[in-house]
Image (cartoon, rainbow, N blue to C red):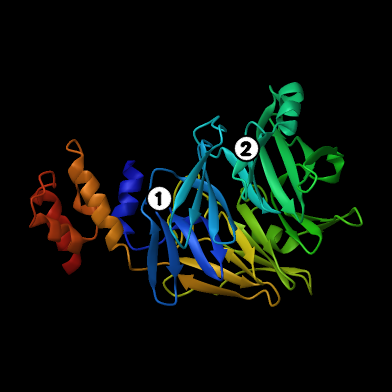
């Protein structure tokens, strides 16, 4: 655990920070950042239910097929299926490991198959959920090896119904190549690169259109059926921001019937909302009174979104609330992620520390009440009094 992660554990023990999650029957199942456990979040009861204490993997993408969630390991080594009813897990080999972070572009479910896409190699692993057999589609990978091996940085991916759109981001600044992959036919073909802009931040598929957010304050809208491109200059945001320093402040977007939510990256705290009816953009102000962010260098404040059953769920990656947006009205509701129910996790954490004689248990890693409980037991490797007093003192000042 790094010094920064230690600080987070110390100050934020009860907050359910998450970026990788799925929604089943309006219930959120998420892997918690830094803890790596899988939980069901019940914000109405202000608690979490622990689904799995297995913290061996940090997951980057996931998708649900009925009551089973398929999680892809951030290193690209395994795909893990987790049955949320029985809590049983299965592992499937991926072999996507190329770098030490972000090895997965996407995980998608279609017609009983789970498609897992490598972010660096361009390989597509296809798991048949009925037969539990895995096949490897290397059609994109072969093109990368043949034409882009020396120039590719990574692969982005967006889904539009039964099609995946791949963007090959190249070393040369503001250059990319585009391909589309038919999930039903498992067929890949190249797209005219002039269709898409290169200065893009992220894209969002909604109502047969791909909305492409750019870092130059433009929003490009591609009508896929008509193959027509429209561009909107977000002049209100441009006028509110320093046009030089503000490039690179957006991380992702969400599109509804009424508006478009634009979420901040690392160096900005403002959510912006574009109103479709009057073509204006405003800075969002309707946060809960105790809303706050963690600030981590190189981390976007928001990452993953899931559109499920008429709502879009926005993960609380670095905030103490997560967001649910109604697709019809465009209105958002914040739900607190400062939750209870972590005792089982911390007891498991302590037991593993006790079994590993070379490790030490510090008060900063667990809630004070649980820490003091274990001081009364035969725990040989608990840090001594110089740490205990610090946390007790904070309770009074």
Q: Are marks 1 and 2 in contact (CB under 8 Å)?
A: no
Rounded to the nearest whole Å, what is the CA distance between mark 1 and mark 2? 21 Å
Q: Quadrant of residue 66?
A: bottom right
Horizontal and vertical percent position of residue 13: 32, 59
Q: Earlier in the sequence, mark 1 or mark 2?
A: 1
Would you call the spot at circle 2 few (<14 residues within 10 Å), some (14-19), or many (20 or more)? many
Viewed as shown, does residue 78 lie left or right of 192?
left
Q: Nearer the viewer, residue 196 or 372?
A: 372
Q: Is residue 320 above or below residue 298?
A: below
Q: Is residue 366 visible?
A: yes
Marker count (numbered): 2
Horizontal and vertical percent position of residue 25: 56, 70
Q: Element at badge 1?
A: loop
Q: Element at badge 2?
A: loop
Q: Is residue 216 visible?
A: no
Q: Nearer the viewer, residue 59 or 195?
A: 59
The residue where tag 2 is placed is 119
Q: Quadrant of residue 194?
A: top right
Viewed as shown, does residue 108 lie left or right of 314?
right
Q: Quadrant of residue 166?
A: top right
Would you call the spot at circle 1 few (<14 residues within 10 Å), some (14-19), or many (20 or more)? some
Q: Residue at x 48, y 58 (%)?
A: 30
Q: Residue at x 27, y 56 (%)?
A: 346
- Work out which residue is located at the far front of the displayed protein and give it: 131
Q: Nearer the viewer, residue 51 or 340?
A: 51
The residue where tag 1 is placed is 36
Q: Residue at x 61, y 48 (%)?
A: 245
């Amino acid at each position: 655990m790094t010094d920064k992660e230690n600080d987070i554990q110390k100050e934020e023990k009860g907050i359910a920070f998450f970026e990788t999650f799925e929604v089943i029957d309006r219930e959120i199942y998420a892997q918690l950042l830094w803890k790596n456990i899988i939980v069901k979040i019940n914000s109405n009861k202000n608690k979490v239910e622990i689904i799995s204490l297995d913290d061996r993997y940090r997951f980057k993408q996931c998708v649900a097929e009925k009551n089973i969630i398929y999680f892809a390991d951030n290193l690209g080594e395994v795909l893990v299926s987790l049955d949320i009813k029985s809590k049983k897990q299965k592992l499937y080999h991926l072999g996507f490991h190329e770098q030490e972070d972000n090895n997965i572009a996407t995980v998608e479910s279609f017609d009983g198959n789970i498609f897992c896409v490598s972010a660096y190699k361009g390989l597509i692993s296809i798991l048949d959920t009925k037969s539990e057999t895995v096949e490897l589609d290397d059609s994109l990978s072969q093109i990368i090896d043949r034409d882009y091996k020396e120039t590719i940085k990574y692969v982005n991916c967006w889904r539009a119904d039964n099609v995946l759109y791949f963007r090959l981001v190249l070393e040369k600044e503001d250059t990319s190549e585009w391909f589309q992959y038919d999930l039903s036919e498992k067929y890949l073909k190249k797209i005219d690169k002039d269709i898409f802009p290169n200065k893009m931040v992220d894209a969002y598929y909604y109502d047969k259109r791909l909305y492409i957010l750019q870092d130059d304050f433009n929003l490009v809208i591609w009508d896929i059926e008509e193959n027509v491109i429209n561009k909107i200059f977000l002049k209100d945001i441009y006028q509110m921001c320093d046009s030089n320093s503000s490039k690179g402040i957006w991380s992702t977007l969400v599109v509804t019937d009424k508006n478009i939510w634009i979420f901040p990256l690392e160096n900005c705290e403002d959510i912006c909302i574009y109103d479709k009816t009057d073509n204006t953009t405003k800075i969002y102000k309707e946060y809960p009174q105790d809303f706050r962010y963690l600030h981590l260098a190189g981390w976007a404040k928001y990452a993953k979104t899931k559109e499920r059953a008429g709502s879009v769920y926005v993960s609380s990656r670095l905030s103490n609330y997560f967001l649910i947006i109604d697709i019809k009205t465009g209105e958002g509701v914040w739900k607190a992620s400062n939750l209870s129910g972590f005792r089982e996790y911390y007891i498991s954490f302590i037991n593993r520390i006790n079994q590993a004689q070379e490790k030490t248990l510090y008060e900063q890693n667990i809630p004070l009440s649980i820490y003091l409980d274990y001081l009364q037991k035969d725990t040989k490797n608990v840090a001594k009094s110089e740490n205990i007093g610090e946390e007790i003192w904070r309770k009074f000042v």
